[in-house]
């Protein structure tokens, strides 16, 4: 698949099965991530790989986060949450890890972390891997952030659920944009 086709027709894959991405495929993903636009070349991001039984430990954190907000959740709801990370054979967590810099505000560094994440999902699509960028309220809860070992200054940008695609193929996505683009400054 050429680069423009991957960029213009990328879709997410909510249903994923084994096998997990190979180390060669992960290498392509991370090499793509670190080519995100990055003001000051600060590399203000890092990545966690969660696979195998570590996914259940992430599930435990999701349950702990939910219990903190809603102590009344039932055992069935807790079981459902605990199983969420098992929806993919492997998860990559993008962590925005801002650096002190006199000219590059934290906002720009967070944008760069999102760009790194988008580079990974584009690369995954080009490799014919299934991928889905997910967050959900647990991504913003300290029990999850601390449980994953984040520093106070760090944030979760996304959980990339990765694996083999399954289920019906998504239709080719709509790439129309005319209502989003306008000329500026031609009237004066
Ligand atoms: C920061 C971010 C967080 C997201 N979190 C979720 C999520 O938790 N659950 C979900 O179903 N989709 C989430 N999405 C959207 C999906 O990744 C996906 O882009 C969307 O379903 C549209 O499908 P498409 O990528 O095939 O166009 C998120 C996207 C972004 C950028």
Image (tube, rainbow, N blue to C red):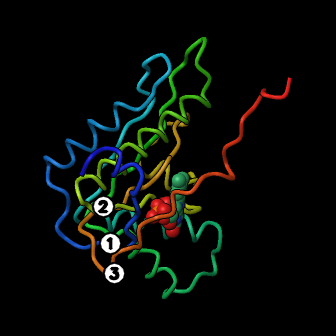
Q: Is the CB of mark 3 within 8 Å of ligand 1?
A: no
Say which of 150 and 180 sits in front.
180
Name the residue at 16% across, 67% down: 19
Disc 1 marks which residue? 86
Task: Give the CA separation, mark 1 to mark 3.
Answer: 20 Å
Please state which of residues 179 and 146 is positioned toward the viewer in this rendering.
179
Where is residue 24 shown, x and y percent of the image? 13, 46
| Dot in front, 2 or 3 | 3
10 Å neighbourhood of mark 3: few (<14), some, or many (≥20)? few
| Total numbered badges shown on the rendered structure | 3
Q: Where is residue 70 in the image (x, y as percent from the top left)?
A: 65, 73
Residue depicted at 49% across the width and 86% down the height: 75
Q: Mark 3 points at which residue?
A: 168
Regarding mark 1 in the picture, which secondary structure is present there? Answer: helix
Q: Which of marks 2 and 3 is nearer the N terminus?
A: 2
CA neighbours of label 1 inside 10 A, class few (<14), some (14 to 19), many (20+): many
SS assignment at label 3: loop
Q: Outermost residue, top direction?
A: 102
Let me know if residue 61 appears in the view.
Answer: no
> Which of the 4 image quarters holds residue 32?
top left
- Closer to the eye: label 1 or 2: 2
111 relative to 142, above or below: above
Callout 1: CB less than 8 Å from ligand 1:
no
Disc 2 marks which residue?
A: 162
């Amino acid at each position: 698949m050429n680069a423009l086709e991957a960029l213009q027709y990328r879709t997410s894959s909510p249903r994923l099965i084994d096998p997990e991405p190979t180390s060669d495929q992960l290498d392509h993903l991370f090499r793509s991530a670190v080519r995100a636009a990055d003001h000051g070349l600060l590399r203000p991001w890092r990545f966690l790989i969660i696979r195998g039984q570590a996914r259940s430990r992430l599930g435990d954190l999701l349950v702990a986060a939910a219990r903190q907000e809603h102590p009344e959740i039932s055992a069935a709801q807790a079981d459902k949450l605990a199983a969420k990370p098992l929806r993919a054979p492997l998860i990559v967590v993008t962590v925005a890890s801002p650096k002190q810099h006199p000219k590059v505000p934290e906002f720009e560094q967070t944008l760069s972390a999102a760009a790194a994440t988008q580079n990974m999902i584009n690369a995954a699509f080009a490799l014919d891997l299934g991928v889905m960028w997910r967050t959900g309220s647990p991504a913003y809860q300290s029990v999850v952030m601390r449980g994953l070992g984040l520093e106070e200054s760090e944030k979760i940008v996304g959980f990339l659920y990765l694996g083999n695609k399954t289920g019906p193929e998504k239709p080719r996505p709509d790439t129309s944009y005319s209502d989003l683009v306008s000329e500026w400054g031609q009237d004066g």
